[in-house]
Image (cartoon, helix red, strand yellow):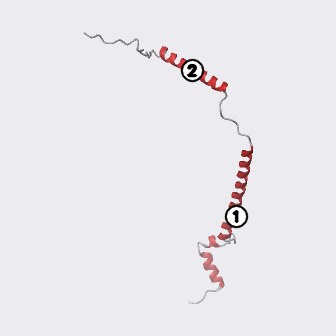
């Protein structure tokens, strides 16, 4: 058993089924270089996003705040609509559904007769 010649060596390598996978070189960059570039891009994106958010915060602070309180007219209209809605709902419930909710007044109650 001796050493292989260059032609024999190439024939053995080419007959290997994995030769097609490792035949050509892909990218000569290392994984460390790829990950470093990716981390730098991510850091730049985060810095740009933080800058945009900071600018948005300063714009929001400078804008006058609108009041969320109701005006007296809005409160009045809201109260009237609620009152009318309650009355209409009560009438429909009593008349259409045949349900009568009768409230007893204290004056209408009678004491039981005692013997």
What residue appears at the point 73 percent right and 48 percent down from the top-left corner?
58
Quadrant that contains the C terminus: top left
What residue appears at the point 62 percent right and 78 percent down from the top-left corner?
13
Quadrant that contains the N terminus: bottom right
Question: Could you tell me which secondary element the residue under label 1 belongs to?
Answer: helix
Number of labels in the image equals 2
Q: Which residue is mark 2?
A: 83
In the rendered image, the residue lying farthest to the left is: 115
Q: Quadrant of residue 84?
A: top right
Q: Position of residue 67 (x, y in %)?
A: 68, 35
Q: Quadrant of residue 77?
A: top right
Q: On the rendered structure, is 41 left or right of 13?
A: right
Q: Which residue is mark 1?
A: 40
Q: Position of residue 29 (x, y in %)?
A: 69, 71
What residue appears at the point 63 percent right and 82 percent down from the top-left corner?
9
Q: Is residue 3 above or below residue 109?
A: below
**Dot 1 surroundings within 10 Å: few (below 14), some, or many (20 or more)?**
few
Q: Is residue 69 above or below residue 25?
A: above
Q: Nearer the viewer, mark 1 or mark 2?
A: 2
Residue 7 versus residue 65: which sits nearer the camera? 65
Asked if the residues shown at circle 1 and circle 2 are in contact, with their CB atoms under 8 angstroms apart, the answer is: no
Q: Position of residue 47 (x, y in %)?
A: 71, 58
Q: Quadrant of residue 109?
A: top left
Q: Position of residue 85 (x, y in %)?
A: 56, 21
């Amino acid at each position: 058993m001796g050493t292989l010649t260059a032609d024999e060596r190439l024939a053995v390598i080419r007959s290997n089924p994995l030769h097609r996978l490792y035949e050509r070189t892909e990218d000569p960059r290392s994984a460390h270089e790829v990950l470093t570039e990716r981390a730098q891009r991510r850091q730049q994106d985060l810095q740009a996003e933080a800058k945009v958010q900071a600018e948005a915060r300063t714009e929001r602070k400078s804008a006058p705040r609108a009041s969320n309180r109701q005006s007296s007219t809005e409160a009045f209209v809201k109260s009237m609509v609620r009152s009318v809605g309650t009355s209409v709902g009560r009438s429909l419930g009593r008349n259409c559904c045949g349900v009568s909710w009768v409230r007893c007044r204290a004056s209408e109650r009678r004491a039981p007769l005692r013997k």
